[in-house]
Image (tube, rainbow, N blue to C red):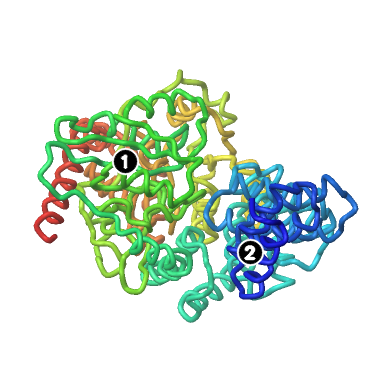
């Protein structure tokens, strides 16, 4: 080995010349011979940090602290290295590493609010809401003026079902920072969930203005499309604003990745389905039998799942339905995209979109030559710099009559929504077992409460007033919505006890209880989707009102597919008139029910095999078009 003094001189010279890499190599040579030299450990740790080799830097500073626990400089340096490593890990989607880094930092500097905040962010991304709740709470104990921490605390409280606390957290975030526009969108959406409509119209107008005039304002596209009075053009703009903000840098990365695609003739097309919801979820009752019905002579069908395995029969059935079921939950977006590309997927279908736990970033890397937006998010996913994030959106001509409202090229099916014909139906029960009066006319709506608007609820109250022996049967989503709806009923002069709330139960029991409803009243502007299919599957007439946006036309599409125009209205006035007519004239409602039964027997709405053939033809068409064009 060279003389230590000579190596030291080379190291110091390299450091003076700004060659940190060479200096580090030389100091490390000396350290091999003198491993207990703390000064050398410090120098090597600092050089690693300078070179952004933070994991190595943290190792040096840990060793210093193990030898001398009182070194405050080493403790600060370790925290810095871990913070940089944790931030880098979060940016790259390695939340487990980020969590480990911030857990370690908080042991060394427990009074730093920012470290607890970042720990909470990592834990939330890892699906640990209780741990994230504790971390955000601790962060706010140390700094009560952090609007972002209140917003993220609200997100976790929302996910834990603590909606009243989530609303309070969003309100506090906005008090601290009125420009925290995504907190406003979260606040409004949760107010919709609890049916608190006070001031909602004014706040919606504020959001509409932000979408139009401030593209940098991050407004949740899903929350926005659920809000009354927003237009299809505004929803497109909102999605594009979000997409531009979140994924523009990923498009640049995707161009650097230079993924190449195999366009040679092939015996089978590889179709990838990407989702967080391959579990006991409404999605399962739409697509499972479709997946089972795909033609394996022409297609290989692969699932890419990034949701939890809930160990339910629905999950097991889905796992068996696909040719391959690939769990990508523990891969970051880039590595998930690389895996999909390595599998030579020809068409990637995203079934989640901008809904809970979205990982649209995977699609933004363009791991497949063709991408399709379908089913999870009922709207366009927007565009980046004038380029659509997705190539296609699956729709039908009822749902999407105007292509200008969508960034994607529209791919039309006879009916947009697939349906499983094997829905489990439980044993029938009595009306009294459902807390329904025995001689009552039962209006029902089993949609989630965020879909209930003040305007539609007012129609429902007028119907109850004009049909004295009627009740309104609603899904019990949360305690706050129940209280607020009962109060709104009393304000409208209706006994609150005429609102009957159905508890959440297993799907078989839920479907069976449809037998006690007389007429399903749909919501606007966000229609029943899976719940509409449930009602029709159980031969329950569903009355809808057609709106101008995607979400407000799904039930109309389903009813048209079963030839039931009598249940479609084009204004809330017509909707109210038809509901009253059917409630007051039982013979007309009986005719509707009889016709619905007959039409369902002829319809292909619950024929997944036919749906699969129609869908497969679209896949073949767009692949042929892709090959010709490229």
Of mark 2 and mark 1, the one earlier in the sequence is 2
Identity of the residue drawn at 45% across and 23% down: 313
Q: Does 503 sit above or below residue 64?
A: above
Label for residue 588?
1
Identity of the residue drawn at 65% across and 53% down: 29
Q: Residue furthest right?
A: 70
Query: 604 or 186, which lies in front?
Result: 186
Q: Is mark 2 on a helix, strand or loop?
A: helix
Give how far across and how far down residue 146 sits, in percent.
Answer: 75, 66
Residue designated by label 2: 23
Give how far across and how far down residue 298 sits, in percent.
Answer: 15, 35
Q: Does 589 sit above or below residue 250?
A: above
Identity of the residue drawn at 44% across and 36% down: 327
Give residue 131's quadrant in the image: top right
Mark 2–mark 1 Cα distance, whole angstroms, equals 89 Å
* Label 1 neighbour load within 10 Å: few <14, some 14-19, many 20+: few
Q: Is mark 1 on a helix, strand or loop?
A: helix
Q: Does 288 sit above or below residue 8?
A: above
* Label 2 neighbour load within 10 Å: few <14, some 14-19, many 20+: many
Q: Which residue lies furthest to the top in this view?
A: 427
Q: Quadrant of the C terminus?
A: bottom left
Left or right of 262, for residue 166: right
């Amino acid at each position: 080995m060279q003389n230590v003094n000579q190596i030291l001189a080379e190291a110091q010279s390299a450091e003076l010349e700004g060659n940190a890499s060479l200096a580090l190599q030389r100091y490390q040579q000396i350290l091999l011979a003198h491993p207990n030299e703390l000064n050398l450990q410090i120098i090597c740790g600092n050089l690693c940090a300078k070179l952004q080799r933070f994991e190595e830097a943290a190792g040096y500073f840990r060793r210093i602290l193990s030898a001398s626990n009182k070194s405050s400089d080493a403790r600060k340096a370790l925290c810095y290295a871990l913070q940089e490593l944790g931030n880098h890990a979060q940016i790259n989607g390695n939340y487990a590493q980020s969590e480990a880094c911030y857990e370690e930092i908080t042991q060394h500097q427990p009074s730093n609010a920012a470290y607890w905040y970042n720990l909470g962010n990592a834990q939330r991304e890892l699906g640990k809401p209780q741990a994230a709740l504790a971390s955000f709470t601790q962060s706010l104990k140390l700094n009560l003026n952090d609007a972002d921490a209140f917003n993220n605390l609200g997100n976790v409280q929302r996910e834990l079902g603590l909606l009243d606390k989530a609303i309070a957290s969003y309100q506090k975030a906005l008090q601290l920072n009125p420009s925290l526009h995504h907190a406003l969108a979260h606040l409004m959406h949760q107010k919709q969930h609890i049916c608190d409509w006070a001031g909602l119209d004014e706040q919606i107008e504020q959001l509409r203005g932000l979408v139009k005039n401030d593209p940098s304002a991050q407004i949740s596209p899903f929350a926005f499309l659920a809000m009354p009075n927003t237009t299809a053009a505004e929803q497109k703009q909102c999605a594009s604003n979000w997409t531009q903000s979140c994924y523009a840098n990923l498009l640049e990365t995707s161009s650097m990745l230079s993924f190449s695609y195999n366009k040679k003739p092939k015996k089978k097309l590889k179709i990838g389905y990407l989702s967080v919801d391959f579990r006991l979820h409404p999605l399962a009752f739409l697509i499972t039998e479709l997946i089972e019905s795909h033609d394996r002579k022409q297609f290989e069908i692969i699932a890419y799942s990034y949701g939890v395995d809930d160990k339910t029969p629905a999950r097991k059935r889905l796992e068996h339905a696909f040719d391959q079921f690939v769990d990508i939950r523990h891969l970051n977006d880039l590595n998930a995209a690389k895996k999909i590309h390595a599998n030579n997927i020809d068409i990637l279908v995203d079934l989640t979109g901008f809904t809970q736990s979205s990982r649209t970033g995977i699609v933004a890397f363009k791991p497949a030559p063709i991408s399709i937006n379908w089913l999870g998010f009922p709207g366009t996913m927007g565009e980046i710099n004038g380029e659509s994030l997705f190539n296609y959106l699956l729709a039908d001509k009822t749902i999407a009559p105007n292509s200008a409202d969508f960034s994607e090229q529209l791919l039309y099916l006879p009916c947009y929504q697939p349906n499983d014909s094997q829905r489990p139906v439980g044993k029938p029960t009595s009306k009294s077992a459902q807390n329904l009066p025995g001689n009552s006319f039962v209006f029902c709506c089993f949609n989630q409460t965020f879909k209930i608007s003040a305007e539609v609820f007012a129609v429902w109250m007028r119907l109850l007033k004009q049909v004295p022996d009627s009740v309104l049967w609603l899904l019990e989503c949360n305690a706050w919505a129940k209280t607020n709806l009962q109060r709104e009923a009393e304000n409208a002069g209706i006994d609150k006890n005429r609102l009957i709330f159905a508890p959440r139960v297993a799907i078989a029991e839920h479907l069976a209880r449809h037998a006690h409803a007389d007429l399903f009243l749909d919501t606007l502007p966000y229609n029943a989707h899976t719940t509409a299919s449930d009602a029709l599957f159980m031969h329950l007439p569903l009355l809808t009102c057609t709106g101008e946006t995607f979400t407000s036309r799904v039930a109309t599409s389903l009813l048209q597919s079963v030839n039931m125009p009598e249940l479609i209205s084009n204004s809330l006035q017509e909707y109210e008139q038809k509901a009253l007519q059917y409630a007051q004239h039982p013979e007309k409602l009986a005719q509707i029910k009889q016709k619905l039964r007959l039409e369902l027997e002829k319809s292909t709405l619950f024929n997944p095999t036919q749906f699969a053939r129609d869908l497969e033809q679209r896949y073949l068409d767009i692949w042929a078009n892709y090959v010709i064009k490229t």
